[in-house]
Amino acid sequence: MMNEYGSSVLRTAYFYLGDRHLAEDISQEVFLRAYRNWTSFRGDSSVKTWLTAIAINACRDKLGLKMTREQPTDPVLMPGAALRSVEEEALERLDQTTILKYIVKLPAHYHEVIYLYYYLDLGTREIAEATGTPEGTVRGRLHRARELLSECLAKEGLA
């Protein structure tokens, strides 16, 4: 699981926490929790969705204890992240990297769904499962987040 989903879990933790070292700690914790609770995994969702839910909950727990939060940066640009070739990744994520600074300005529940949908390629059902939010709410937040992002980009002359 760590080989297949480790990068995704680390990037999710980094996105939430904005701190590389905390993200690494949370990633280890996620896989420890998954190992300890493997028998409780019912298979109702994919392993990726299950691990993402564990990561989100672990990050939320950690944020409750953390007094300050650094501004998150593009998780794809984290040093040491497992990447394909730099050129392939840069070309694929260029637009997402450019707009990330606008995404993080959105309220947390909006940039959360944008991140999970576009960066982790989760569907609305998987996001709902991972965040414990009704799927209709996820769809509504995703729609509203796109609207807000579009308005913001239009003001900057980027849309």
Image (spheres, helix red, strand yellow):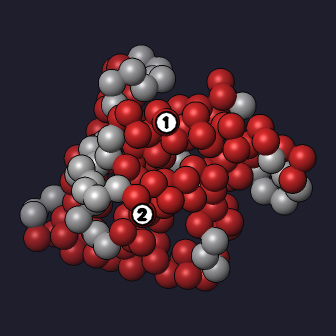
Q: Amino acid at mark 2?
A: Gly
Instruction: Residue 35 in the image: state x and y as whole percent.
Output: 77, 38
Q: Residue at x 27, y 44 (%)?
A: 73
Q: Residue furthest top?
A: 85
Quadrant occupied by the C terminus: bottom left
The local secondary structure at tag 2 comes to: helix
> Could you give the CA–CA distance between mark 2 and mark 1, rounded to whole angstroms?
16 Å
Res 153 quadrant in image:
bottom left
Residue at image location 37% in from the left, 64% down from the top: 111
Amino acid of disc 1: Asp
Identify the residue position indicated by label 2 in the image: 64
Disc assigned to residue 25: 1
Q: Is residue 118 positioned above or below 130 on the image?
A: above
User: Where, quadrant-wise, is the N terminus in this rendering?
Assistant: top right
**Proximity of marks 2 and 1: CB atoms separated by less than 8 Å:** no
SS assignment at label 1: helix
- Indicate left or right for 121 with 114 as reference: right
Q: Position of residue 67 (x, y in %)?
A: 28, 59
- Residue 105 can be seen in this image: yes
Mark 2 or mark 1: whose residue is earlier in sequence: 1
Q: Residues within 10 Å of mark 2 (few under 14, many from 20)?
A: few
Q: From the viewer's perspective, tell me whether residue 142 is left or right of residue 96.
A: right
Left or right of 31 in this view: 147: left
Q: Is residue 11 visible?
A: no
Q: Is residue 127 above or below residue 62?
A: below
Residue 119 is situated, as x and y percent measured from the top left of the image, at 46, 48
Place of residue 6 in the rendered image (x, y in percent of width and height, measured from the top left): 59, 32
Between residue 8 and residue 93, name the one nearer to us.
8
